[in-house]
């Protein structure tokens, strides 16, 4: 069951790895997405068109990151 209240503008399949970044700031997290080249191209285009905005990354309906592009 999804906890998201809005429909995503892009959906793709990816292997997701997340956790502590290992840096001095313990609150910093890392997210690694492993996807096919077609989905990577879509994500690249989305990123280029939304510089300076936040990108919500959700996995199985739960937000795992919201980095600034």
Image (tube, helix red, strand yellow):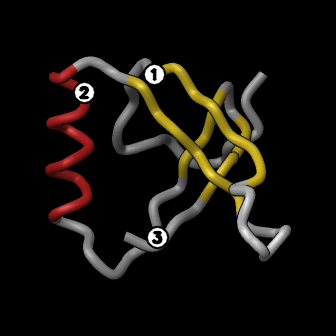
Cα separation between marks 3 and 1: 20 Å
- The percent coordinates of residue 47 (x first, y second) are 25, 59
- The percent coordinates of residue 2 (x first, y second) are 73, 29
Helix, strand or loop under label 1: loop
Helix, strand or loop under label 2: helix
Q: Does label 3 or label 1 sit earlier along the sequence?
A: 1
Q: Quadrant of residue 1?
A: top right
Cα separation between marks 1 and 2: 9 Å
Above or below for 61 versus 50: above
- Tell me, yes or no, whether the two marked residues, 1 and 2, touch with CB atoms within 8 Å: yes
- The percent coordinates of residue 10 (x first, y second) are 35, 38
Residue 14 is labelled as 1
Residue annotated with mark 2: 39
Residue annotated with mark 3: 54
In this rendering, position of residue 2 left or right of residue 55:
right
Q: Does label 1 or label 2 sit earlier along the sequence?
A: 1
Residue 63 is labelled as none
């Amino acid at each position: 069951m999804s906890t998201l209240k809005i429909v995503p503008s892009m959906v793709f399949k990816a292997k997701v790895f997340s956790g502590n970044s290992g840096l001095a700031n313990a609150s910093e997290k890392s997210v690694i997405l492993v996807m096919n080249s077609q989905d990577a191209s879509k994500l690249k285009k989305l990123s280029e068109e939304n510089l300076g905005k936040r990108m919500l990354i959700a996995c199985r309906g739960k937000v795992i990151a919201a980095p600034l592009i």
